[in-house]
Amino acid sequence: MKKRNGYTYLIVGFAIVIALYTSIKVAAKQTFWLDDKLADLFAYVPDTFNPFFLLLTELGDKKGIGIVALIVLGWLLLIKRNFLGASAIALSVALGNEVNKLLKDLIARPRPELEHLAHVDSLSFPSGHAMVGLTCYFFIAYLVIEDIKNSSTRKVVIWLTALLLLLIGASRIILQVHYPTDVIGGFAFGYLWVMLSIFIYKFFKKKLKKKAK
């Protein structure tokens, strides 16, 4: 348990550094060599894969996340009877989306000056698909594995969630609507937000368990 907590603190610290570094540098209108390198790398993805990435990017969109969230809320409320979990994930995603809007307005980074292959109507940094998507799917994964005892099954859920999030993040770069650092910054902010949300969820869960005794 201590070892697991140590890894969590390390990742949180790393996410804080990434979130601060990217935010400060973007706000100062400085460029990233990583943006050019990763954009050039993703440019090798054939255009024939665009429909696949358009489908993936919908899973990080407001509508996609809304549909997934409704399904998960139904599962939590009607099957698991986890009213606290349902409230926690609903608030986390909704407030995370508002925090993302605030960050976009504060930092005010324009979108890449390229042909956008997906509809966009907001500023660029941090990526909402990355930040809110990570908040939603990471929290879902946490609630799914909460009662799973088998470590192999837990790992499968974690790896599938990580793969989905990476593909959603990649789709935003491939569809030319985000700089790579928008996505990286979005993941960093999203991780910090979801870890705070899970901490609050666990705090109230312990409180409710004590009251039930």
Image (spheres, rainbow, N blue to C red):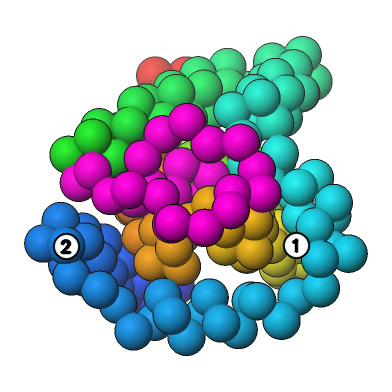
Give the amino acid type for the residue marked by disc 1 in the picture: Leu
Q: Nearer the viewer, residue 32 or 206?
A: 32
Comparing labels 1 and 2, the label whose residue is closer to the camera:
2
Residue on which the image places disc 2: 29
Q: Is residue 115 above or below residue 8?
A: above
Image coordinates of residue 195 in percent, x first then y, are: 38, 50
The numbered disc on residue 20 is none
Query: Which quadrant of the figure has residue 203?
Result: top left
Image coordinates of residue 67 in percent, x first then y, are: 72, 23
Residue on which the image places disc 1: 160
In the image, 174: left or right of 204? right
Q: Are marks 1 and 2 in contact (CB under 8 Å)?
A: no
Image coordinates of residue 129 in percent, x first then y, are: 53, 45
Give the amino acid type for the residue marked by disc 2 in the picture: Lys
Q: Quadrant of the N terminus?
A: bottom left
| Highlighted magenta segment, given as a residue range | 107-130
- Residue at 85% from the left image edge and 51% from the top image edge: 51
Q: Nearer the viewer, residue 207 or 198?
A: 198
In the image, 90: left or right of 100? right
Q: Nearer the viewer, residue 5 or 29?
A: 29
Label 2, secondary structure: give it.
loop
Label 1, secondary structure: give it.
helix
In the image, 165: left or right of 100? right
Residue 11 visible (yes or no): yes
Q: Check residue 122 for magenta coloring.
A: yes
- Residue at 47% from the left image edge and 85% from the top image edge: 37
Q: Main secondary structure of the magenta part?
A: loop
Residue 154 visible (yes or no): no
Q: Earlier in the sequence, mark 1 or mark 2?
A: 2
Please tell me how many numbered marks the rendered image carries.
Answer: 2
- Residue at 46% from the left image edge and 42% from the top image edge: 128
